Image (spheres, rainbow, N blue to C red):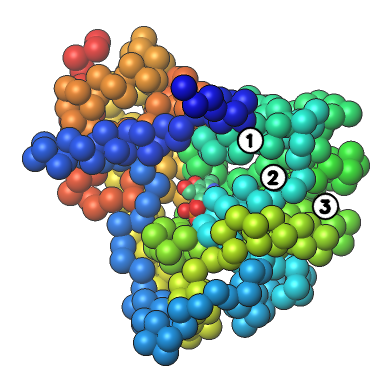
Amino acid sequence: MIELSDRANRISPSMTFAIASKAKALKAKGVDVCDFSVGEPDFVTPAFMREGAKAALDAGQTKYAPTAGLPKLRAAIADKLAGDNGLAYTPEQVVVTTGGKQALYNTMMVLLGPGDEALMPAPAWVTYPEIVKLTGAEPVLIPTDESTEFRVSAAQLAEAITPRTRLVVLNSPANPTGTVYTPQEIAALAEVIVEHQITVISDEIYEKLIYDGRRHVSIGSLGEEILSLTVTCSGFSKAFAATGWRLGYIAGPIHVIKAATALQSHSTSGANTFAQHGALVALRAGNAQEVIEEMRLAFQARRNLVIEELQQIPGLSCTVPQGAFYAFPNISQTGLDSLTFCERLLASEQVAAVPGGAFGCDDNIRISYATDTETLRAGLARLRRFVATLA
Ligand code: PLP
């Protein structure tokens, strides 16, 4: 038998994709499934981005792009980070990657190794601990709960730091909780990071999806010292409804970007060329902000609907998510663990949700509301019926 490496044996497959493929398989059999599993906007990528990629294809842009990305795209991303986020990066401090996920992967691969610890507030997006394990380092979860709307405090972060801590991963707005840190909270975390001279990976992929007038703050924008310790990771998947394009980016200190580019040169060779041309058009499009705003408003309306419905289900409780497109209701009163809850919900009511256990929080389940309101209404009615059977 072919033996797997220790590395391969250490990782678990993504629970989100596992549930989503179960739901897809049921749908393919003609079952009427309400799929709340996958974090993927249901909108089609804006026309300007699609046209940009089509024009590039028609012009024969089908060869390798430079490993770090098209120079014009790197410059456009640097401009975006300066304009939207107050982050001072040169184009050389940006590398274009194959999705936001590869941005995180490359970053962690060049920063972490055996013996290192990587901190992350829990619940944490499923992929963070798995990538950390791939590097040989150890993920260390800092638990949070509803009492702080799943925020980690500066004091908690300081307490979790050990001599082995290399970095902390911050994700605001967060998957799976929808938590958005306030500017003051980000500043307090930055102080601890600077004091202890650790690195922060700031995953800002949901930055455009923030509700109720709240504001996104990029931790690296808070001063030169914190910027020198920050690696900003993001991408096009969520803001531009472009999950299938597989485009993301890293921005950070030049030596980190060089190492991430070298790694990329031996793995993917760089991101898809015509997709990058589409992204360039998207960042330069005059109406991009309006289109993004339209999607944000639609998500906000769905968020309101989902929370209103969830809060009326006896036996469930839910904090109000301030960003991203997930609700994270607490199911502990039902007496079921999150995996059993989700398996039974799918089997009896054909509603697909992700067990909170996958994110390190077994009292909750994740509902993605990146789907149409009709499906949301139907699925939540089924969820209510299911919870009633557990009483
Ligand atoms: N970061 C977070 C928190 C996410 O939820 C996701 C996708 O679900 C990503 C990064 C990666 O996005 P992608 O690789 O699709 O660009």
Residue at mark 1 to residue at mark 3: CA–CA distance: 22 Å
Task: Check disc 1 and give the amino acid type.
Answer: Leu
| Label pair 1/3, CB-CB below 8 angstroms | no
- Residue 247 drawn at (x, y percent): 51, 63
Task: Check disc 2 and give the amino acid type.
Answer: Met
Given this view, does label 2 or label 3 mark the residue nearer the observer?
A: 2
Indicate left or right for 232 with 226 as reference: left
Above or below, comparing residue 130 to residue 85 in the picture: above
Q: Residues within 10 Å of mark 2 (few under 14, many from 20)?
A: many
Q: Which residue is mark 1?
A: 134
| Label pair 2/1, CB-CB below 8 angstroms | yes
Q: Which residue is drawn at the image coordinates 87% and 61% (left, top)? A: 224
- Residue 51 drawn at (x, y percent): 36, 82
Residue at mark 2 to residue at mark 1: CA–CA distance: 9 Å
Q: Earlier in the sequence, mark 2 or mark 3?
A: 2
Above or below, comparing residue 95 to residue 49 in the picture: above
Given this view, does label 2 or label 1 mark the residue nearer the observer?
A: 1
Q: Which residue is mark 3?
A: 229
Where does the C terminus fall, quadrant-wise?
Answer: top left
Determine the secondary structure under disc 2: helix
| Label 3 beta carbon less than 8 Å to ligand 1 | no
Of residues 139 and 342, the one drawn nearer to the viewer in this rendering: 139
Image quadrant assignment for residue 117? top right
Q: Earlier in the sequence, mark 1 or mark 3?
A: 1
- Residue 147 drawn at (x, y percent): 57, 26
Task: Check disc 3 and give the amino acid type.
Answer: Leu
Q: Which residue is mark 2?
A: 108
Q: Residues within 10 Å of mark 3 (few under 14, many from 20)?
A: many
Of residues 368 and 24, the one drawn nearer to the viewer in this rendering: 24
Indicate left or right for 116 with 349 as reference: right
